[in-house]
Amino acid sequence: MNSNNKLMQFQNNSRYFIFAALILSIIGFLDASYLAAEHYLGKIPPCSLIAGCETVLTSKYSAIYGIPVALGGAVYYFAAFILIFLYKEMEQKILLRLFFLFSALAFFASLGFVYIQLFILKAICIYCMASAATSTLLFLLSCIMQNIKKSSSVDEAR
Amino acid sequence: MDEQEQQQPTKYELHLQKRAEQKHINKVGAYMRLAKKMLLMLFIFGGAMAVVFGLVKWAGTSAPQTTIALDAVSLNDWLKGNKDSSVTLVEYSDFQCPACKSYMPLIKQLLADYEDRVRFVYRHFPLSQHKNAEPAAYASEAAGKQGKFWEMHDMIFDKQSEWAEKRNAEETFAEYAKTLGLDIAQFTQDTNNKELRDKVDADFKSGVSAGVNSTPTFFLNGKKMIQPRSVDEFKQQIDAISK
């Protein structure tokens, strides 16, 4: 009875986590799209009174082999959204594991980009930091969801 | 007993089979529905990205506020081009801003082509995140005191990457002054001149009150320009008002 309650609680929570992850990936996607758009459309981004975005977005770290990092971010958020959505529909563990793998990759990439902004460029782009925040949260969620899955399957086995 | 045992699994198996079949039918349908949803999402996300691109593009070209009080050209301003022209192009610029640097050749080209049609004014707008922008502005003004403002202006922009991140950029500017053949003692003294620093500050303040929030910002006859992206776009806007 007790373990059953626990299981239900876990499953209930997991629904919230899925919902949060979906929302976060949409936010991240829009943010990354904005940055990609700036990269492609703003030929000469002006220097603004408030942010150091232009330094970050025009730096050599903003693109890898001509592909803007932001576009990679948008693709990641889209993939994350699809994986979580598919998991919600199909409940296949492999999807959750893939999501975990992707989000871990994105998290470490974000760490790298935050490091570059703080210590190499010494300029902060608020939109890039927002993306780092969403990818960190997604990574945390993926860790939690993995663990829930594990504990609930342990409960089921009992 | 034995029969029962044999029968029970068969019943269960039948049930399982039935369920599996039903599941299979459901599965095919579910996969189709899922595929449709995926396709829909692909369109939605693609559409969202297109909308974001559209918005950024629109924001870059949409007309800003039309009338802004801009300080009239004064004797203190640095002028280039035809000083008596009725067309005045004012630039608020920051020496350490990469965008301002990339606009310099455009302005040069414009002034070469429209030399007697435009009066170009350069005003300082050193942004706080560029720690060497103010010293650069002081250096250009100090060079101006010895009649070489534009020479120093060009040199500072040309060598932006050389001094932008330096701790003692002032020394680099003094070297530039030497290269330009200026009186170094006078130059160094002038860079610390309060009057000169007040002028840079006044430029900045006039920019703030005119609604400048990024550099470079151009004003054509007192109106904030839609950021031109090429010499031709400058010319088009100038042609439009001087017809």
Image: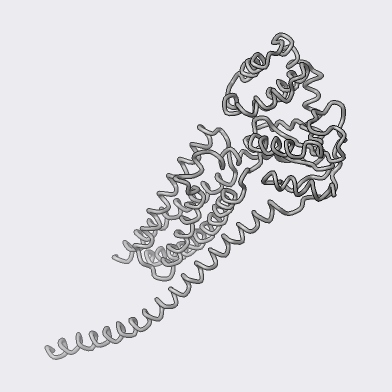
Q: According to the image, what is the colour scheme of the structure?
A: one colour
Depth check, front residue: A41 or B213: A41
Depth check, front residue: B10 or A59: A59
Location of residue B157 with respect to B38 vertically, above or below = above
Location of residue A22 with respect to A143 vertically, above or below = below
Side of A86 relative to B242 (left or right): left
Which residue occupies 35% across, 59% down? A151
Side of A40 relative to B178 (left or right): left
> Picture coordinates of residue B119 (x, y %)?
81, 35
Depth check, front residue: A78 or B234: B234
Which residue occupies 74% across, 20% down? B148
> How many discs appear?
0
Quadrant for the N terminus of chain B, please: bottom left
Q: Most extreme residue toward the top, as rendered?
A: B185
> Picture coordinates of residue B80 (x, y %)?
78, 31
Which residue occupies 69% across, 32% down? B94
Question: Which of the 4 image quarters holds residue B82?
Answer: top right
Side of B18 relative to B107 (left or right): left
Side of A109 relative to B154 (left or right): left
Question: Which of the 4 image quarters holds residue B137?
Answer: top right
> Picture coordinates of residue B162 (x, y %)?
57, 25
Q: Most extreme residue toward the left, as rendered?
A: B2
Depth check, front residue: B149 or A55: B149
